Amino acid sequence: MTVLRQTFLVLALTSAPAFATPSGLAETFAACVGRLEASYAPRVEIDAMEDLLDAAMPAALDWGMPENHVKIVRSRAWKVQRNLQSSAAFADDPIAARHARTAATEALNQCRSMLPMADAG
């Protein structure tokens, strides 16, 4: 593991007390990769989140998480994000569209806040 990846992992672990287990951290990063991909985020953001996921995987696997679990989480998060974006764009009810847009934006903002470049601003 590179020093950069170790640093990312340490920063993520110390800045996010809600991650109670290594598998929880890996699931969070996997979901964020899916959300970023579904939103056509810049490749640099997706790559950075994948680096965080790669750094978290050894500990998650040691914790007992099945290796294919991150693919499932990533896929589900992609689907949820696309559904939110679709609802935001095409919902007949403007209130439902606004709620979907807000949920999609908040999910992406949470993911982006974990990226190392988020502090470079």
Image: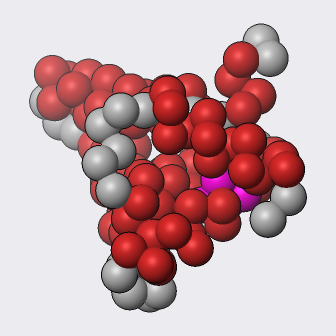
Residue at 57 percent across and 49 percent down: it is 36
Residue at 77 percent across and 12 percent down: it is 121
Q: Nearer the viewer, residue 35 or 19?
A: 19
Task: Report the span colored magenta.
Answer: 49-53
- The way the protein has been coloured in the rendering is secondary structure
In the rendered image, is residue 40 in sight? no
Position above or below: 60 against 67: above
Position above or below: 29 against 121: below
Q: From the top left corner, tell me how far across and down residue 104 is, in percent.
A: 38, 36
Position above or below: 1 against 49: below
Count of numbered marks: 0
Residue at 38 percent across and 27 percent down: it is 106
Q: From the top left corner, tell me how far across and down residue 101 is, in percent.
A: 34, 29
Q: Nearer the viewer, residue 107 or 50?
A: 50
Q: From the top left corner, tell me how far across and down residue 71 is, in percent.
A: 46, 78
Position above or below: 15 against 58: above
Residue at 35 percent across and 45 percent down: it is 19
Majority secondary structure in the magenta region: helix
Q: Quadrant of the N terminus?
A: bottom right
Q: Give left or right: position of 113 versus 71.
A: right
